[in-house]
Image (cartoon, rainbow, N blue to C red):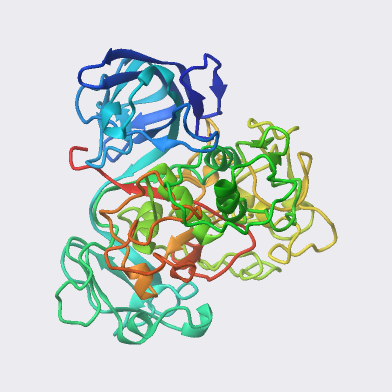
Amino acid sequence: MVSFFLLSLTATTQLLANGITVQKVSLSDTNRTEKTVAIRFNISWENSWRDSINWDAAWIFVKFREPKDSVWRYRHVTLSQTGNIPGTGNANMKFAIPDDRKGAFYYRSEMGSGHLKMDSVKLLWHYGADLVTNIDSVEVKLFATEMVYVPGGSFALGDGNGSLKSNSAFQLKNAPNNYVMITEQWSPLINTKNNNELSGQDDITLFNDGVRISGLQGLDINNDKIADLPDFPTGYRSFYCMKYDVTQGQYTDFLNTLSLRDSSTFSPFLSDTVRLKRINPKYKLALRRLDVFYFSKPLNPLRHTIALDTVQGKYTVTRPDRAIGNTSPEQALSFNDWAGLRPISEPEFEKAARGPMAPVYKKISSYAISDSSLGWSGFDWAWGNDTLSNRVTSYNANLILNYNGVENGKEFFTNYNYLKRYFNPLFANSSRNPTATIERRFTGGDQEDGPYRVGIFATDSSDRIISGASYYGIMDLSKGVGKNVVSMGLETGRSQSFKKHGDGYLNAYGNHEPLEFSSINLSFGIASASFIYRLEAVSNRNNNSTYTGIRCVRTAPSDN
């Protein structure tokens, strides 16, 4: 259920993703004195809900371009916190607009579930605040992506059962191999066990000394129970998390609507290329950094479908619902900045996956193939307390997944079931899933290893385990592409602030600004080394992967 959408206000064409749809976008109710205008649209998405625990929402933000702007230059709309109309339809809805007004959360105000359809929704734009002088000539593009609300409260960090834990998982320093509960009070000292597991990536502050976490007060790094980093996103406060990984369609929209700051700080000696010959020199520099395969060809060309149309000078995509893979931390940060979001922290990741529940360990050792080669350690994955004792017993025909046909955004695996729940087709033909006696691990579709459609395991009848949903209904946290998560193991990662989100603009190089997501002054912002790789068991921590995607979050607004 892909959740990203792009539409020009001057267009009447419906663009359809298989989760969220926006139609009939127009400008109305222009007030030229106050310099405001309403952005009017219809919106719908599948499997919307609100229950006693949480809800899903659409994060809506808008880009605009004036005739004087380059074809590649889009600016970010500043919304109003008042004067918005939630529309009419089959549910009562509300907006929550953050104080920076870079976008709006849109969600049910009452309990309910099912297909959501709302008409005549209006967001008020103070176009004067964005220095627009002639609203009649503006081109606007509206984006919406599905998010899930993660409520505030206590949760477990790490998964140790007293004698074992996942790779480099967090633990109690003075009682190794035990998880710790994060509450509003100061925790005991937390560290990691074996720094060699991450090739020394955790620094001495975390690995040797240990840190304390208070859900509301932040991080204490010198053991005096006084917050040294009060704005660190501890996971205790409420936030919104993207329901799915960023898709190739979303990343294509990002490349085609870059918002670069006006600056002369770019290389005048940048050589021209055939690929970018029709593109403004300033944007060539940014695209060289943001195009995932600008300098190389993908190892899996049938799985990566974003390409530059050298005639039109725009990016195209043929599998928009498929997750983007092979992204760098810098590219992930730029996407977060552009979308008005921020990267997820390690505690937030474990909270989003496990909710308030304690971790579960269940070792199964009665199979010919070892648990380690199955990519399963016995610790809980995002779908929770897996009480089923059966799994596949070999890597032969039992592990082949069959596509139902063409990968067109509606595809699914016809023979996926509980027995195969620990199998990730991302690594279908790699050493992660040994080939045994056959060459391929799935049939049909586009073939080859690599990313697949987000949410592919969820159906109308699937339960939490078979769909791979987290406690809060967030999809694919343990499968699909790996997640770039901001690490607590380095100072630059610990400097991340729950108060700071992207402002919609990148610098002239296509990068986020150094202070965009950080609470301290960093020369280069949150660096690539500040990220840790998350996949499979909730508390499992690694430092690299072949296929790494993007998952964004945003702190919940105060009026949520």
- Percent across and percent down for residue 228 are 20, 73
- Percent across and percent down for residue 172 are 31, 78
Front position in the image: 392 or 507: 507
Q: Quadrant of residue 312?
A: top right
- Percent across and percent down for residue 104 are 31, 33
> Vertically, is 66 above or below 231?
above
Front position in the image: 169 or 482: 482
Q: Residue at x 60, y 49 (%)?
A: 284
Q: Quadrant of residue 63?
A: top left
Q: Residue at x 73, y 60 (%)?
A: 394
- Percent across and percent down for residue 256 are 56, 38
Left or right, residue 295 beside residue 46: right
Q: Residue at x 49, y 43 (%)?
A: 244
Q: Quadrant of the C terminus?
A: top left
Left or right, residue 505 beside residue 550: left
Residue 387 visible at all: no
Front position in the image: 452 or 27: 27
Q: Quadrant of residue 130?
A: top left
